[in-house]
Amino acid sequence: MKKITALLLSLVMILGLAACSSGTPSSNESSTAPESDGTLSSQISTENTDTEAGNTLVVYFSATGNTEEAANYIAQLTGGDLFEIEPTDPYTSEDLNWTNDNSRVSQEHNDESLRNVELIADTVDNWESYDTIFIGYPIWWGIAAWPVNTFVEANDFTGKTVISFCTSASSSLGDSGELLAELAGTGNWLEGQRFRSSVSEADVQQWLDSLNL
């Protein structure tokens, strides 16, 4: 009788150990496999983004934030890099008051010799790696805001596709893009685009789709 009881106890222990052993690997695999897959997917996504960003650069000067918003949309939708044109002496709200004849922009408009605006930086790292350059600006008196001129003059656009864009409350793009192309003297400059001041991502997406880049 004792032998039978001992045998039954042994069988119960063996079955219990087998059940525990069969559950543990399953639990571990289910917790580690998604981690591994997620890490791999993240690495692939990052590498693809870096590759796309290497071809497109979005350069912009923004006086009140409208052009910056458009530039951010373009960069996000194209996977491009951003470069902000920043005057060494930033424009204040008083400087931008075009209704005041004594304001900075009014004086610069009236005297072209004052439009040579010094920038914090007028060149971009790895410039040669970019194939497509978007250049954005607000419209000042029917032309591109002149801080952009300093950047355009400082760079060689040979072999690059250049596309201008602007923001304005009512003014059109006008000849602003053509004037910048003449100033640059190099590059394949395409017809640009004017966006309203309250630009939307949908507006930008529709325009980018029409470019077929």
Image (cartoon, rainbow, N blue to C red):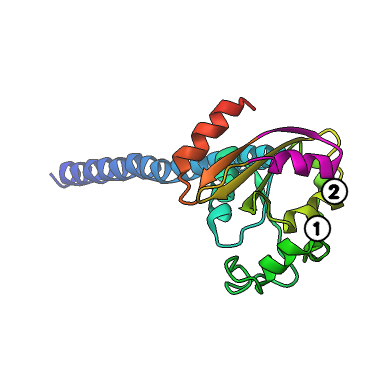
Coordinates of residue 112 in the picture (x, y in percent): 80, 60
Please, what secondary structure does the residue beneath circle 2 have?
Answer: loop
Label 1: which residue?
122
**Residue 147 position (above or below residue 92):** above
| Residue at 81 percent of width and 62 percent of height | 116
Please, what secondary structure does the residue beneath circle 1 have?
Answer: loop
Coordinates of residue 66 in the picture (x, y in percent): 53, 55
Sequence-wise first label, 2 or 1: 1
Judge by depth and name the residue closer to the eye, 43 or 99.
Answer: 99
Q: Are marks 2 and 1 in contact (CB under 8 Å)?
A: yes
| Residue at 55 percent of width and 59 percent of height | 65
* Residue 128 falls in image quadrant: top right
182 in the magenta segment: yes
The number of callouts visible is 2
Quadrant for the N terminus in the image: top left
CA neighbours of label 1 inside 10 A, class few (<14), some (14 to 19), many (20+): some
Q: Which residues are magenta?
A: 174-191
Judge by depth and name the residue closer to the eye, 125 or 98.
Answer: 98
The CA span between labels 2 and 1 is 8 Å
* Residue 84 falls in image quadrant: bottom right
| Residue at 39 percent of width and 41 percent of height | 30
Circle number at residue 41: none
Coordinates of residue 92 in the picture (x, y in percent): 61, 73
Q: Is residue 124 visible to the viewer in this orientation of the structure?
A: no
Judge by depth and name the residue closer to the eye, 14 or 210.
Answer: 210
Label 2: which residue?
155
Q: Is residue 171 visible to the viewer in this orientation of the structure?
A: yes
Q: Amino acid at mark 1?
A: Asp
| Residue at 59 percent of width and 49 percent of height | 71
Quadrant for the C terminus in the image: top right
Side (left or right) of 91 relative to 201: right
Q: Amino acid at mark 2?
A: Asn
